[in-house]
Image (cartoon, rainbow, N blue to C red):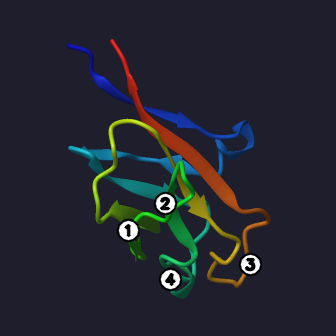
Amino acid sequence: MAKKLLDIEEPSYLSNKVKQDLKFKTGNFVWRVTFNIPLDPKTVNSDTMYVTNSQDQKMQTYIRYDVKNEVIEVEPLEPYATTGYYFLNITTRVKSKGGQSLRDPISIKFGFAEGV
């Protein structure tokens, strides 16, 4: 039986800026996104970060910022399908504690693929 693997595509220029730590929960996993500077917790919410499916429809998610560990957690409130692709979107409205915005929005494509 083939294992399900997560296929993540991200632009190479993001490799040092966005780190993903995925915790699988049978179609539900939590994205853990770490920035290189502390964020303003008031700017981390479902309007500034969200997941969309391949039809560009917003998925229901719960967004929280762990101030102590400086990690954003994006938890789905509905399971991801085991086929198709999704996008984790981070807008320029996410700001650092000092008020600095991202230069460009970030969109990371992910989905399940058959593996060995």
For label 3, the SS is loop
Mark linked to residue 41: 4
Answer few, some or many: residues within 10 Å of disc 1's Cα (few below 14, many 20 plus, some between 14 and 19). many
Mark linked to residue 25: none
Evaluate if marks 4 and 1 touch, with contact meaning CB atoms under 8 Å apart.
no
Evaluate if marks 1 and 3 touch, with contact meaning CB atoms under 8 Å apart.
no
Query: Percent position (x, y) of residue 58?
Result: 49, 65
Answer few, some or many: residues within 10 Å of disc 4's Cα (few below 14, many 20 plus, some between 14 and 19). some
Task: Give the amino acid type for the residue marked by disc 2 in the picture.
Answer: Val
Which residue, given by chain and number where applicable, does mark 2 sit on? 51
C-alpha gap between disc 1 and disc 3: 25 Å
Evaluate if marks 2 and 1 touch, with contact meaning CB atoms under 8 Å apart.
yes
Query: Percent position (x, y) of residue 2?
Result: 26, 15
The correct choice, above or below, for 16 with respect to 34 in the image is above
C-alpha gap between disc 4 and disc 1: 17 Å
Evaluate if marks 4 and 3 touch, with contact meaning CB atoms under 8 Å apart.
no
Q: Along the polypeptide, which appears first: circle 1 or circle 3?
A: 1
C-alpha gap between disc 4 and disc 2: 19 Å
Residue at the spot 42% in from the left edge and 63% down from the top edge: 59
For label 2, the SS is strand
Quarter placement of the C terminus: top left
Which residue, given by chain and number where applicable, does mark 1 sit on? 61
C-alpha gap between disc 2 and disc 1: 7 Å
Mark linked to residue 100: 3
Q: Along the polypeptide, which appears first: circle 4 or circle 3?
A: 4
Evaluate if marks 2 and 3 touch, with contact meaning CB atoms under 8 Å apart.
no
Task: Give the amino acid type for the residue marked by disc 4 in the picture.
Answer: Pro
C-alpha gap between disc 4 and disc 3: 13 Å
Evaluate if marks 4 and 2 touch, with contact meaning CB atoms under 8 Å apart.
no
Task: Give the amino acid type for the residue marked by disc 1 in the picture.
Answer: Thr
